[in-house]
Amino acid sequence: MLRRLAFALMLSLVASLTVFSQIVPQTVFPFPQIAIGQMGDGNEFRTQVILTNPSEREAFGTMDFLDDEGRDITLWVRSLRTGELRRVTGVLPFRIKSGVTTVWELSSADSVRSGSSIVSTDYRDGGNGVRISGTAAYGIFDERGNILSLAGVGASGFITDAFVPILDDSSRAMNTGIAFTTVLPTTIFFSLLDDNGNTLATAQASYRDGIHRALFYNEIFGRPPYSRLTIRSVRIISNNPIATIAIQMAGNTLTSLPVVAIAGVSYKAGDAPLDLGGILRRRHSTMDLSAAPMP
């Protein structure tokens, strides 16, 4: 239980490999993990979100903050460009001028909690359709605000079929965790494969939109971990796109593992395969994003 809690809270301390080898400007992209809050020893988690507008037009849109059940997170958002500090619940409207990079730092005076974020400039979510790119930097800060640990991860892609490598050895406290976020009601099918690619176990679960989960692979299949070094693969197939990352944990050491995409969605303005209106449009229906403040 303690290791699972550590995985859920510490996922954000490492850079994960995403579906794309480079950060490609898009109109919608998720960060499958954010972490904020006080750790109880004077240190705290903060998340910095870095957005760049490489287009020739100003971009406006929203950044949504969701907990594990898809509910609004209330947090403090500080612009590192202007120093402005705002208390935000759920949604941060933004505008970014052409050629500009902006950085927001997310924090909380409450205890540590995790969740996810979705950035959108898409027309259907209230934005103006300009493609932007994003990176998140996750860190531990001391009570004076000094950085103790910091790691970055580019925004994830959306996958519908992928492989995740698994390394497991309980004798060395080694295991592999998988975290994912849904953006639409989704059924996910998991298959554990052996050295010959044969299926050892299967599992499936259905989730509504906006759900975030972080689990060790053996918890997904209801199996105990292996007692000696074992290398396996997990195949993940979903009927709607999800954002996912994989982390190997060995004691207190965390290492990112690649999510090898077989099929997915690169979302751009006007794309039909993925409409995030189900989760975002309900939240943005009364917003005038063109009037959002500059960071």
Image (spheres, rainbow, N blue to C red):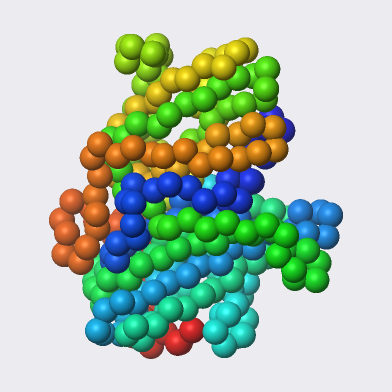
Tell me: 108 left or right of 266: right
Residue 204 visible in rendering = no
Give x and y (percent) for residue 218.
53, 22
Q: Quadrant of residue 31?
A: bottom left
Relative to 245, residue 142 above or below: below
Q: Residue at x 44, y 68 (%)?
A: 63
Q: Residue at x 64, y 63 (%)?
A: 46
Where is the N terminus found, in terms of image quarters?
top right
Q: Nearer the viewer, residue 1 or 161?
A: 161
Q: Residue at x 47, y 26 (%)?
A: 166
In the picture as drawn, the residue positioned furthest to the right comes out as: 41
Report the label total.
Answer: 0
Give x and y (percent) for residue 172.
67, 22
Relative to 75, residue 54 above or below: below
Q: Quadrant of residue 121?
A: bottom left
Q: Residue at x 26, y 75 (%)?
A: 130
Q: Quadrant of residue 237?
A: top left
Tell me: 114 left or right of 55: right
Give x and y (percent) for residue 188.
35, 32
Q: Nearer the viewer, residue 1 or 126?
A: 1
Residue 52 visible in rendering = yes
Give x and y (percent) for residue 70.
48, 52
Tell me: 194 left or right of 4: left
Tell me: 241 left or right of 146: left
